[in-house]
Amino acid sequence: MYERKKNMQKRMPPEVEQMRAMILEFNISKAQLLFNGDELVARYTEK
């Protein structure tokens, strides 16, 4: 299982401070990566 953590507020300019307060700082997604020869399949899971 692989986890990807993305900072959702990092690129937001300081002018949108009110909007920043309503958005979670991090979005975390999890995926199961399956390898078969030269193919890769990513299966994303719900939280």
Image: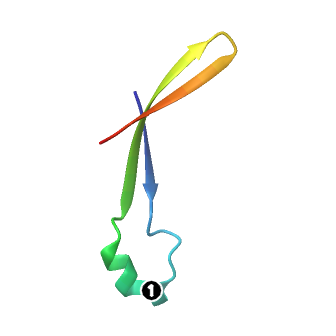
Q: List the single residue furthest toward the right.
A: 38
In the picture of the structure, the residue carrying the numbered disc 1 is 16
Front residue of 9/23: it is 23
Q: Quadrant of residue 9?
A: bottom left
Q: Secondary structure at mark 1?
A: helix
How many neighbours does mark 1 have within 10 angstroms: few (below 14), some (14-19), or many (20 or more)? Answer: few
Drawn side of residue 13 relative to residue 19, left or right = right
Amino acid carrying mark 1 in the image: Val
Drawn side of residue 41 relative to residue 46, left or right = right
Q: List the single residue furthest toward the bottom.
A: 15
The quadrant of the picture occupied by the C terminus is top left
Question: How many marks are shown on the rendered structure?
Answer: 1
Residue drawn at (40%, 44%) of the image: 29
- Is 44 placed above or below 35 here? below
Residue 11: x %, y % from top left: 53, 71
The quadrant of the picture occupied by the N terminus is top left
Residue drawn at (52%, 19%) of the image: 34
Residue 44: x %, y % from top left: 44, 35
